[in-house]
Amino acid sequence: MDINEVRKKVKKFLTEEFEIEEEKIKPDADLKSDLGIDSLDFVDIVVVVEDVFGFKITAEELKNVTTYDNFCDFIYKKVSQQ
């Protein structure tokens, strides 16, 4: 899976599962302030990532993930290690 496929899947679940407007999802969009993702949403994101990408993540791993681009890069690195 390449980075573009990861971005496409992440954008899809952010718009469908979390009802974030697609035009808000930009590479430098801050997950919390720009996309409105709160701590409860992060719990749901952990579940969705496991379903979509097949691996588990922890809140600790997401501590330094602040933007949409960071998030996609993080997932891509994890997928590449599988």
Image (cartoon, grey):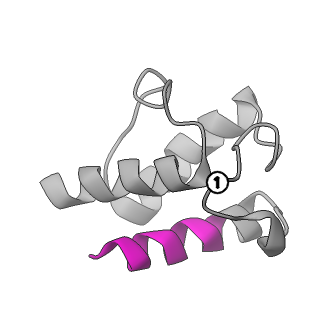
In the picture, the quarter occupied by the C terminus is bottom left
**Side (left or right) of 40 relative to 1:** right
Label 1: state its secondary structure. loop
Q: Position of residue 5 (x, y in %)?
A: 41, 79
> What type is the residue that disc 1 sits on?
Asp
Q: Is residue 68 above or below residue 5?
A: above
Q: Position of residue 71 (x, y in %)?
A: 50, 49
Tell which residue pokes out farthest to the left in this image: 81
Q: Is residue 35 above or below residue 22?
A: above
Query: Which residue is depicted at the point 26% across and 76% down?
Result: 1
Say whether residue 81 is visible: yes
Q: Which residue is mark 1?
A: 28
Foreground residue among 65 and 20: 65
- Mark 1 Cα within 10 Å, few/some/many (few <14, many 20+)? few
Query: Which residue is depicted at the point 37% across and 61% down?
Result: 53
Q: How many marks?
A: 1
Q: Position of residue 28 (x, y in %)?
A: 64, 54
**Side (left or right) of 29 relative to 34:** left
Foreground residue among 18 and 74: 74
Q: Position of residue 10 (x, y in %)?
A: 55, 65
- Chain part drawn in magenta: 1-13
In which quadrant of the rendered view does residue 12 lie? bottom right
Foreground residue among 44 and 67: 67
Query: Does residue 5 belong to the magenta stretch?
Result: yes
Query: Does residue 53 belong to the magenta stretch?
Result: no
Say whether residue 82 is visible: no
Query: Which residue is depicted at the point 63% across and 66% down?
Result: 13
Taken as a whole, is the magenta stretch helix, strand or loop? Answer: helix
